[in-house]
Image: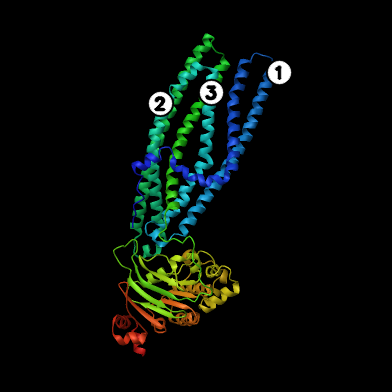
Amino acid sequence: MARTPTPAPSKEEREKSRELGALRALVPFIAPYRPLMFAAILALVVTAVISLMLPLAVRRVIDNFGSGEELLDQYFIAALVIAGFLAVGTGLRYALVTRFGERVVADIRKAVFDRVISMSPAFYENIMTGEVLSRITTDTTLILSVIGSSVSIALRNMLIFSGGLVLMLFTSAKLTGMVLLIVPAVVIPILVLGRKLRVISRQNQDWIAASSGNASESLGAVQTVQAFTNEAASRGQFAQMTEESYDAARRRIQTRALMTVIVIFLVFAGVVGVLWMGARDVRAGDMTAGALVQFVIYAVMVAGGVAALSEIWGELQRAAGATERLVELLQTEDTVQDPLQPAVLPSPVAGRITFENVAFSYPARPGVQALDGISLTINPGETVAFVGPSGAGKTTIIQMILRFYDPQSGRITLDGIDLRDMARAQFRRSVALVPQDPVIFATSARENIRFGRPEATDAEIEAAAEAAAAHGFISALPDGYDSYLGERGVMLSGGQKQRIAIARAILRDAPVLLLDEATSALDAESEGAVQAAVDKLSADRTTLIVAHRLATVKKADRIVVLEAGRIIDTGTHDELVGKGGLYARLARLQFTDGIAAE
């Protein structure tokens, strides 16, 4: 579905950012590289000073044109030396500034990714991953353009502007006074149109992010889109968002072009007027031709500096909008937080899991109880299966044990310690998960399995694959375990993906095993092999199973029946079938063959 992008900033927010205050958020990323920044600024100052020396040399040449040939040669040689220093300084400035910009933006990208990769699932209920990726790529590219180029050019032109203005004053105070009359006329449109430009730039970036999120979602489900012949609808949604982005870009370009036209016309109209007055002073003998040329060069440099600043102002406005969007990610508070002084799990982990009157509603559906007063103890080494209709809360229990969410009331403990009292990274090391929709990374089969335990040896990986009945099909791949599996495992069948995920969990060798429909995509032969591996794996582990397959459910030590977020019954398969409740009805619908076999 099409998503509305983040709304444009309010009037109050725009007032706060009128002077590019949003860019202050970049200071923590810039601070570690102050020496590099100061070296770049030094190179920039030197090149600006050398640029301001060139008109002085030109004046000397013109005013002494009738002097001896030797003196004239010296002036030209001096001008050439100055140009050489200018070239070297400019190259050094470019290298330092560009390296500085790349370094800072690389740190920003890492900081944003570090932040979003650790956010709990509630964060992704309100933002699409495509939008996050757009902020990490598009927005940081804008900031790179500003830090690695625009700021440098702006500082250089500010130095040229201020230095040229001072030298113009020494050259002719009268003509300089005339030039200063047009400064207010130039600054006002920069401020007025610049503020409008920032708002439009933010809207433009929001629509780009929205279209990126839409494209990411559609391409990620391209087979489903094609199967339901919804290509036209997907094209229409993406085209609409792209056109909205283009419309915002068009308004941004028009505003910036208008600002550029006004500023350049006013600046150069003033230069022409000043040149006309200067020419009259030369004819009257009040100033030399060389002084007039020197003044004109400085005036052009000052005018060019002002024009460049008007262009760069627009870039800074866009970067301010991009910075705001990145800061939103960096400052987003996660709903699930680690304690300042986390408790430590005892070693070895026994795997006792307790739910104490747990109630929970998903943030996107606060009025619906996903879990309603759940109280349950799962003993170490016990295998417990959760059964119930869709929406009963089975998968929610798995997510709560991984502490993807925190309960609104009650608590969940592992070996007697509240999950909220521990660092998530610590207790999750004691948990292995096989999800219903297995995630396959765009890398080799070996590395996909190694994801369960990065330090595992190749022999351990192959042993895990053997146990998960995955060794046969992996060995048959073109490069065996080193075969590239494609994005989201496009080269594998659903059952093969699931066996890779099971091998990953087996390799993790954790005391708590979570199986969320782990065998749902397997054929009968593979299921038998995998089930045997799971049985062996879960023998001395606390195992929670969400499943509909009879073979898995019947072998569980205990079956917990859920409905509407509540536990309505518990017992073994035979006990629950004999009671004739919800489980018996589900058994008749889903496990008919199994019951008949008895």
- Quadrant in which the C terminus appears: bottom left
Q: Are marks 1 and 3 in contact (CB under 8 Å)?
A: no
Q: Are marks 2 and 1 in contact (CB under 8 Å)?
A: no
Q: Are marks 3 and 2 in contact (CB under 8 Å)?
A: no
Q: Residue 379 appears at what percent x and percent y?
A: 44, 79
Name the residue located 41 percent from the left edge and 26 percent from the top edge: 184
Q: Amino acid at mark 3?
A: Val
Of callouts 2 and 1, the N-terminal one: 1
- Quadrant in which the N terminus appears: bottom left
Real-space Cα distance between discs 2 and 1?
A: 47 Å
The answer to whether one can see residue 305 in this image is yes
443 or 21, nearer to the observer: 21
Q: Residue 262 appears at what percent x and percent y?
A: 40, 29
Tell me the residue that label 1 is attached to: 70
386 or 210, nearer to the observer: 386
- Find residue 237 and report its image quarter: bottom left
Tell me the residue that label 2 is attached to: 185
Which SS class for mark 1?
helix
83 or 52, nearer to the observer: 52
Name the residue located 60 percent from the left edge and 75 percent from the top edge: 459
Q: Residue 593 appears at what percent x and percent y?
A: 35, 85
Mark 1 Cα within 10 Å, few/some/many (few <14, many 20+)?
A: few
Residue 166: numbered disc:
3
Residue 284: numbered disc:
none
The answer to whether one can see residue 250 in this image is no
Real-space Cα distance between discs 3 and 2?
A: 20 Å
Of callouts 3 and 2, the N-terminal one: 3
Q: Nearer the viewer, mark 1 or mark 3?
A: 3
In this rendering, position of residue 365 left or right of residue 417: left
